[in-house]
Amino acid sequence: MGFIIGFLFMIAVIGGLFYLLVIYREVPGAVEQRLGVLEALPEDINKWKVDTESEAGKDAQQKGLKRETRLFHDPSGGGFLGGGKLVRQARYRNQATNAIVRVEPDEPVTRKRVRK
């Protein structure tokens, strides 16, 4: 008897997850209606800025480098709920030649959902 109840419970859980998967992926506006919309992207998106305030920026200046950062939005990324992928990128340039010396790995930036 316990096996049958457990089996039926598992079928219900799998069916519920499948339903949510189909609804959230295929119905336009379902995610926004239930979870809210993603906060707006910053105004200076995809623009490189010289970083002089952070510890890494100050350290780079002492080494004769210039640290530049930007927020990059990839609309094709973003996973299951969509909305794109926002990452912080940083690169270091030689102050004398302005050549790129090295690049830091991308750092994901999480965006909050705002209910309207």
Image (cartoon, rainbow, N blue to C red):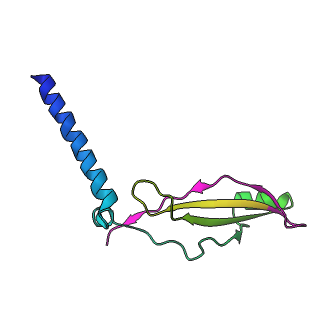
- Give the image location of residue 112, x and y in percent: 43, 63
Viewer-proximal residue among 106 and 52: 106
> On the rendered structure, is 7 left or right of 52?
left
State the quadrant of the C terminus: bottom left
> On the rendered structure, is 20 left or right of 102?
left
The residue segment tinted magenta is: 93-116
- Give the image location of residue 50, x and y in percent: 73, 69
> On the rendered structure, is 25 left or right of 16?
right
Kindly indicate the quadrant of the structure image that contains residue 58: bottom right
> On the rendered structure, is 59 left or right of 38?
right
Q: Is residue 112 magenta?
A: yes
Q: Is residue 66 above or below residue 6?
A: below
Kindly indicate the quadrant of the structure image that contains residue 106: bottom right
**What residue is rendered at 12% in x and 23% in y?**
2
**What residue is rendered at 89% in x and 66% in y?**
97
Q: How many marks?
A: 0
- Give the image location of residue 109, x and y in percent: 54, 59
Furthest residue toward left: 1
Viewer-proximal residue among 78 and 69: 78
Q: Is residue 67 above or below residue 42?
A: above
Furthest residue toward bottom: 43
Kindly indicate the quadrant of the structure image that contains residue 54: bottom right
**What residue is rendered at 31% in x and 51% in y?**
21
- Give the image location of residue 78, x and y in percent: 47, 57
State the quadrant of the N terminus: top left
